[in-house]
Each structure stands twice: as structure tokens, then as C-alpha cells.
Image (spheres, grey):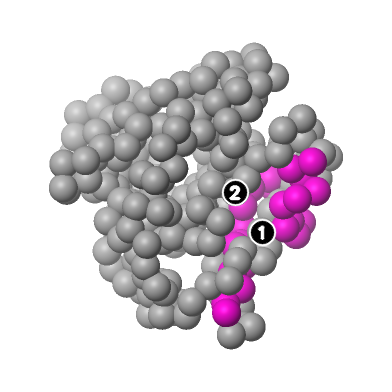
Amino acid sequence: MAVYDLDHFTLGVRHLYASAERLRGETGLRCHEGGWLDAVPTAHRTIPLPGDAYVNVESVIDHHAELPPGVGAFRDWFEQTTRRGDHWMSWNLRARSRADLEEVARRFGGEVVTAPGARRPDGSTWSTAMAPGNVAVTWGRGLPNFYFHEDMARHPARRAPMDHERPLRGIGWLEVGGDPAELEEHVGAETFAALPLRFVDGPAGLYGVGLTTRDGEEIALRAPSGAPGLAELAARSS
């Protein structure tokens, strides 16, 4: 089975700009404008990380848009969840080839979904290709989705390179909950062995990302996982 790399982590917050500035003050991590989604009323700012990974700091930006019922329920859930504090909404892996992403889709009985991504203030857009397509089998279970980027030069972590106030060396660890065997089956044994995982008590989902700095220090980004709430939302909507 192919090996998949870390791609991005989504941190849901109540106030996009205030939260990004708070994180900069607490951690020294700078971010750039990531854009907004037309289909879902959220926007994000992007923190580039080593290895072409990144953190999306994301919040709801349109509280009154008329939306399809499922999208509206997601917006309401996102707002209610982030009102209680920051939450990790998802973590995601990156395929090294389109063929590897198609293999993910076959394995889960899904398909490769290409969808419009973020629209940026400069007029540029970013489309995404992901699998297995049904996020109910990934994010709602606290498991990663899989992406492929045809043009890595336009990848969010590369598009606007920046020096953080505390320069980074790498991603040191991920704290995740759930059953290690379930995660290993989901990502494959090779990827499971390559990821810097730490298992903590709690339902499946992401709880922390540890970054190593060039001066030998560590930056820890911790927040509750939103996965259990996503699972409840999916159950109510089904």
C-alpha cells in the first residue's frame, strides 16, 4: 500500500482574525490569507508547516446565508462548538500521486471528488481532489481524509512562504484518540508507522499537534476534538 503524507489540520475558531492573532501571540506562528468557501460559509487563514503541511484556522463568516438544510445544520453546529472554544475539526493526509488517491477511493468504495476550494481576495481559486468522498466515514469518525494536489507550487503551504517568529524544523507529534488498530487499518500499516502518533484517552480524533523549532524547543497546539460532535450531527441528519 502507498505511503501518505500529512497534508493539513483544521482548527475551528470563533473569530477568524482575532484567533489567528492570538495564536501568533501565543506561539509565534504567522499565517496568510487562505480565502473562503462559497458552498460553506467559512473562511480560513493558513499557517504553513514543514513538509508542505499546514494548519487551517477556520471560522464561520456568514451567519445569515440561506443554505441547504445539511449545510445550515453544519454552520449552526460549527458556531455552537467554537463558541465553547477552539476545536480540531479534521486532520488530513496527502497522496503522492493521483493513482494513490484513486486507490483510496476504491478501498473505501467511494470516489475521487473534485470540488471548488477556497476563493481568495486576489481573485484566485483553489480546487481540491479528495477521497473517499463521503466525509462521514472520515471526519465524523475522527479519521483523516485523503487529498491530492496536481500542482504543488500552488499548494497552500507553498503559495505564500513565510518565516515564523519561531522558525520551525518539523512536526514532532500528533496526539490522537481512538483505537490504534482502526486508524492503522484506515491509513495502512506503512503510513501508520511513518506518522509521529501519540495516542491519548478519548474518542477518535485529533487533540494536539507538536511542532519542533530550530532552536530545539517545542510548540504544542492542543484543543478538544470536534469529531464526536460531527458524528452526532451526522446521526441527526441521516
The residue located at (16%, 41%) in the rendering is: 123
Type of residue at label 2? Leu
- The boundaries of the magenta stretch are 190-214
The residue labelled by disc 1 is 174
Q: Position of residue 15 (x, y in %)?
A: 30, 60
Q: Position of residue 118 (x, y in %)?
A: 30, 40
Type of residue at label 1? Leu
The residue located at (57%, 77%) in the rendering is: 213
The residue labelled by disc 2 is 6
Mark 1 secondary-structure assignment: strand
Q: Is residue 165 magenta?
A: no
Q: Residue furthest left?
A: 122
In this view, 233 is above or below 238: below
The residue located at (36%, 44%) in the rendering is: 154
Q: Is residue 197 magenta?
A: yes
Q: Is residue 178 found left or right of 227 in the rendered image?
A: right
Pointers 2 and 1 in contact (CB under 8 A)?
yes
Q: Position of residue 158 (x, y in %)?
A: 40, 54
Crowdedness near tag 1: few (<14), some (14–19) or many (≥20) residues, C-alpha within 10 Å: many
